[in-house]
Amino acid sequence: MGQDRATAFKRATSLNNGVSISWLEQTWNPKAITSNRIKAADFKLLKVLGFKSVRLPVAFEHFAKTKIPIATVLNRIDEVWKNCNNNGLKLVIDYHYGSLNDTNYTAETQVIIKTWVMLTKHYLKVPADKLFFELYNEPPPMNPQLWKDAAYNIINAIRKIDQKRTLLVGASNYNSIYELSRLVRLPDENLIYTFHFYEPFFFTHQGAAWVGNQVATTGVPFPYNVENFPVLNPKAKATWGETNYYQYKTDGNEQSVKDKLQIVKNWSVRYYVPVICSEYGVYNQYADLDSRCLYIKAVRTNLKQMQIPGMLWDYDGNFSIFKGKPSLITLPDCMKEAIGYAPKK
C-alpha cells in the first residue's frame, strides 16, 4: 500500500502547471457537444507555454438528460485525450455538474457510479500515469459524512475494474479548503486530494452575474490599495459582499493567500497524502489585468513553495489568461511572467 501512496505523490507532481479547458461542462450552451471549439493547435500552444496537464470538466448528467448519446460524449473526450497524448500532456477527466445532495445521495451516487464504471472500462488500457479521474466537481454544501460515504462507494466501484488509476477527490462545500482540513483521509492509497482556491472570492469573482449581488462591487484591485479601492456597490449591501468589502483590506494580499494555502498544506502533511489545487484563477471581465497577473502569480508562487501542484481555471472562457483568442500574441507580458512562461532559446 505504501507503494500506491508513493505513486499518487509522483503522479500529483506530474499534473503541476495544468489548465482546465471549459467547454464540455457548458450546460447553458446547446452547441457545446457538437462544436469542436478546441483544436489540435490549442494543445500545441499549451505545450509551448509550458503546461503539463489538462483538466476536462464534462457535464455527464446534463448530456444524458438532453438525450445526447454517450458515444458522442466519449468521442469528444477521446479527441481531447488523443491531442493531450500527442503533445505529452496529462489529462484529468472531471465529473462536472452533478445533482448530488443530502436528500438524494443514495440514488445519485448510483448514477455517478454508472458513469464512472463506463468510463473506467472505456479507458482501462490507457496508461494510469497519463489519464486521471476526478470523481466529482465541487460537492455541494452537504453533510460531509454523506459526501464521504458517496466518494467511498464511487472509489470502490472503480477499483473493482481498475486498481491502478489515480483518482482525485475533494471535500464538500465546493472543494472547500476548510472542509478538506476537517476531512479524515479515505481508505485508498492511490488518491490525490483536490481543492479549489478562489480566495479572496470578493476579488476573484467580482462582477460575476451567476454569483449574485454579493460580488456586484467591481474594480477591486489586488493587492488591496486604499487609493484605488472602489465604492461599495449598493446592490451588495446587506449581503456577505458588504462584509467582505470591509474585510478586503485584511484579505486582499499575498500573505493572506499564503496563510489560507497553508491550511491545506498542513492537512496534507498531517495525513501524508498528496493534494492538488485543481482550480484557481480570476474572472476576467472586471478585474484589471495587472491585478489578475499579480494574483495568479501570488497563488502560483505559493503553491510552488509549498510543493502543491496547481491547475488554472481556465483556458478559453471567462477566466481566460489571454486577451482574445488564445495565442502567444494575445498572452500579456505580465501573464507570461505570472504563469512562468519561459520561451526556449
Image (cartoon, rainbow, N blue to C red):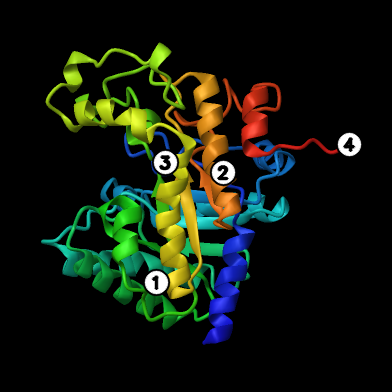
Q: Is residue 84 visible?
A: yes
Disc 3 marks which amino acid? Answer: Ser
Circle 3 sits on which residue? 256
Label 1 with label 3: CB-CB less than 8 Å: no
- Looking at the rendered structure, the number of numbered marks drawn on it comes to 4
Q: Name the residue rendered at 39%, 17% in the picture.
A: 226
Label 4 with label 1: CB-CB less than 8 Å: no
- Residue toward you, 91 or 298: 298
Q: Name the residue rendered at 35%, 33% in the picture.
A: 250
Label 3 with label 4: CB-CB less than 8 Å: no
Going from the N terminus, do you reach mark 1 or mark 3 first?
1
Going from the N terminus, do you reach mark 3 or mark 2 first?
3
Q: CA distance from mark 1 to mark 2?
A: 34 Å
Lateral position of residue 304 relative to residue 122, left or right: right
Q: Would you call the spot at circle 2 few (<14 residues within 10 Å), some (14-19), or many (20 or more)?
A: many
Q: Secondary structure at mark 1?
A: helix
Q: Nearer the viewer, mark 1 or mark 2?
A: 2
Circle 1 sits on which residue? 117
Q: Name the residue rendered at 15%, 21% in the picture.
A: 237
Circle 4 sits on which residue? 345
Label 2 with label 4: CB-CB less than 8 Å: no
Question: Is 243 rendered above or below residue 87?
Answer: above
